[in-house]
C-alpha cells in the first residue's frame, strides 16, 4: 500500500485538474466497462500463473532444510560412532559450511556457482565416509545431495525467470489505458468520479504490483524481504543449528546473516 498510495494520489490530482479545466473528452459508456473487465481478466490470468509457481516455491525452503538437516544428522552419527576419525568432523564442517553458504545465497551474498561447487565437494566427504559407516548411509546421503542440487537449480530458475514478460507488458498497458480513460472520462458529480478513480486505481495498481512480487518469491536483498517473499526460516534454523554444533565441536562458525 505504501507504493500504491502515491500513484492513487497522483490519479486524484490529475482527475481534479481535468475536471476543473474541462479537459474531459471521453463519454462514459458500456465500452469503458468492457475495457475494465478485460483488464481484470488479464490480471487474473497473470495472477493464476504466478500463484502456481509461488505455491511450489513455498515448499522448496522446507525441503531444502530437511535435506540439509538429514546430511547433518548422518555426519553427527558418524562423529559419535568414530570420534577419533578427523574425516567425520570434517564432513560435518563441510555440511555446516554448505548450509551457511545456501543461507547467504538466498540474499545473493553467495554465487550459485559457489553453492554448486560446495554441493559437488560433498563427494569427497562420501568417499572418506566409506570406511566409517554403512553403505546404505552413503546411499541416503547421496540422495539428499541430489535433492539439494535439484532444489537449488529450481530456486535459481524461479528467481531468474519471469512469467511471460510479454503478458506483463500487455497488462501494464491495459492498466494504464483504464486509468487514463477514467481520468479523462466525463463523470458527474466529481465525488463520484473520485470514488471510481480511487477504487479502481488502488485495485489495479495493487494487483499489478502483487503479481510482480509473486513472480519472484526469492527477491531477498540485504537481509530484507518483499511482502510476498516466501519464508526461508527452515533454512535459517538448520544453519543456526549446524553452526551451534560446530561451535560445540570446537570448529569456528561460518559468518551469519540476520534477517
Image (cartoon, rainbow, N blue to C red):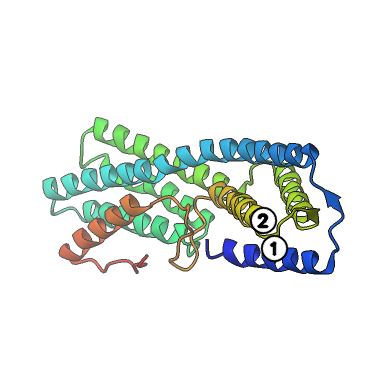
Q: Which residue is mark 2?
A: 197
* Label disc, if present, on residue 228 of the rendered structure: none
Q: Is residue 163 left or right of residue 176?
A: left
Q: Which mark is first along the chain, 2 or 1?
A: 1
Give how far across and how far down residue 155 sits, in percent: 50, 46
Q: Residue at x 70, y 60 (%)?
A: 190
Instruction: Assign a secondary structure to mark 2.
Output: helix
Give how far across and how far down residue 258 sits, in percent: 35, 67
Instruction: Assign a secondary structure to mark 1.
Output: helix
Q: Which residue is mark 1?
A: 11
Q: Nearer the viewer, residue 56 or 107?
A: 56
Q: Residue at x 80, y 38 (%)?
A: 31
What is the total number of numbered labels drawn onto the structure image? 2
Work out whether 246 lies above or below 231: below
Q: Does the image show residue 241? A: yes
Q: Farthest residue in the top direction?
A: 136
Q: Nearer the viewer, residue 169 or 156?
A: 169
Q: Nearer the viewer, residue 175 or 217?
A: 175
**Label 1: how many Cα within 10 Å (few below 14, some 14–19, many 20+):** many
Q: Does the image show residue 126? A: no
Q: Residue at x 30, y 42 (%)?
A: 66
Q: Farthest residue in the front direction?
A: 189
Location of the C terminus (image quadrant): bottom left
Work out whether 11 lies above or below 50: below
Q: Nearer the viewer, residue 63 or 93?
A: 63
Q: Check if mark 1's residue and mark 2's residue have beta carbons within 8 Å.
A: yes
**How far apart are the alpha carbons under marks 1 and 2?**
7 Å
Work out whether 104 lies above or below 67: below
Q: Is residue 244 left or right of residue 97?
A: left
Give how far across and how far down residue 174 sits, in percent: 75, 46
Amino acid at each position: 500500500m505504501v507504493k500504491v498510495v502515491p500513484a492513487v494520489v497522483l490519479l486524484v490530482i490529475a482527475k481534479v485538474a481535468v475536471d476543473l479545466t474541462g479537459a474531459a473528452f471521453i463519454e462514459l459508456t458500456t465500452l469503458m466497462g468492457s475495457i475494465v473487465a478485460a483488464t481484470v481478466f488479464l490480471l487474473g490470468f497473470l495472477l493464476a500463473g504466478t500463484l502456481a509457481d509461488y505455491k511450489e516455491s513455498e515448499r522448496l525452503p522446507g525441503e531444502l532444510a530437511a535435506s540439509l538437516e538429514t546430511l547433518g544428522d548422518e555426519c553427527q552419527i558418524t562423529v559419535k560412532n568414530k570420534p577419533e576419525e578427523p574425516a567425520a568432523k570434517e564432513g560435518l564442517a563441510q555440511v555446516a559450511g554448505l548450509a551457511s553458504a545456501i543461507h547467504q545465497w538466498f540474499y545473493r551474498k553467495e554465487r550459485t556457482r559457489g553453492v554448486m561447487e560446495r554441493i559437488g565437494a560433498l563427494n569427497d566427504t562420501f568417499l572418506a565416509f566409506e570406511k566409517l559407516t554403512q553403505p546404505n548411509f552413503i546411499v541416503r546421503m547421496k540422495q539428499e545431495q541430489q535433492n539439494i542440487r535439484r532444489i537449488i537449480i529450481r530456486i535459481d530458475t524461479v528467481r531468474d525467470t519471469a512469467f511471460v514478460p510479454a503478458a506483463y507488458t500487455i497488462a501494464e498497458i491495459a492498466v494504464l489505458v483504464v486509468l487514463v480513460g477514467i481520468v479523462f472520462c466525463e463523470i458527474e458529480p466529481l465525488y463520484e468520479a473520485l470514488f471510481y478513480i480511487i477504487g479502481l486505481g488502488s485495485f489495479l495498481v495493487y494487483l499489478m504490483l502483487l503479481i510482480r512480487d509473486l513472480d519472484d518469491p526469492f527477491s531477498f536483498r540485504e537481509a530484507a524481504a518483499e511482502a510476498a517473499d516466501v519464508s526461508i526460516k527452515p533454512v535459517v534454523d538448520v544453519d543456526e543449528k549446524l553452526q551451534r554444533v560446530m561451535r560445540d565441536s570446537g570448529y569456528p562458525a561460518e559468518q551469519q546473516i540476520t534477517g
